[in-house]
Amino acid sequence: MDLEYKITFNKRVFDRLQIPIIDIMLMGKYHSFLLDTGANNNALDREIYNQLKNEHNLKEAKEKIQILTSSHVTQEVRELVELPLIVEGQELLFPFTITDLSLLRKEVLTKAGSEVDGLLGSRFFDHFEWMLDFKEWAVWK
């Protein structure tokens, strides 16, 4: 298999929880992201966003989105921000929904001893034309 680009999963997390997590450069530091092809959007934990906002003097999110349930009831309003990621050697702005991921973060930390700061959804995969490979424990293009 001739790969253009490959990132391996955090093997400790995958061994213990069977979920793929990779490290991606976000605003000058590596952050761990759960790969979730079932999610349309990318998400970043509110606590991590607040830390980045303070460290980098980010402005408040200008755009807000409403999450609707199947019965068209507004579940909550979330902020939507664009943040720079370095992927495949390129710095690109990607939209992130800012939300509370504390339960996910606690679960991964408690059961696998690792941090997770956000998730990357299907739009991210579509943009880079990445594929998950559970045999190789990697994402590749």
Image: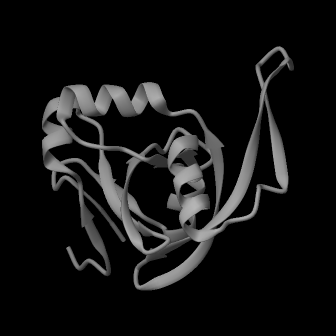
Above or below, 89 relative to 140: below
Vertical relation: 15 (above or below) 141: above
Q: Position of residue 56 (x, y in %)?
A: 58, 70
Outermost residue on the top side: it is 71
User: How many numbered badges does the structure rendering display?
Assistant: 0
Which residue: 31% across, 77% down?
Answer: 5
For this orientation, the residue located farthest to the bottom is 89
Quarter holding the C terminus is: bottom left
- Front in this rendered view, residue 2 or 73: 73
Q: Does residue 52 sit above or below 49 in this rendering?
A: below
From the top left corner, tell me how far across and down residue 81 is, in percent.
71, 58
Q: Position of residue 119 (x, y in %)?
A: 48, 47
Q: Nearer the viewer, residue 137 or 46?
A: 46
The foreground one among 41 and 99 is: 99
Residue at 43% x, 47% y is 117
Is 105 on the left-hand or right-hand side of 50?
A: left
Q: Vertical placement of 5 versus 131: above or below?
A: below
Q: Is residue 105 left or right of residue 47?
A: left
Residue 87's x, y, as percent? 44, 75
Check the image and tell me how it is coloured: one colour
- Determine whether, in the image, residue 91 is placed left or right of residue 75: left
Give the quarter of the figure containing the N terminus: bottom left
Q: Residue at x 43, y 75 (%)?
A: 28
In this rendered view, identify the residue nearer to me: 102 or 92.
102
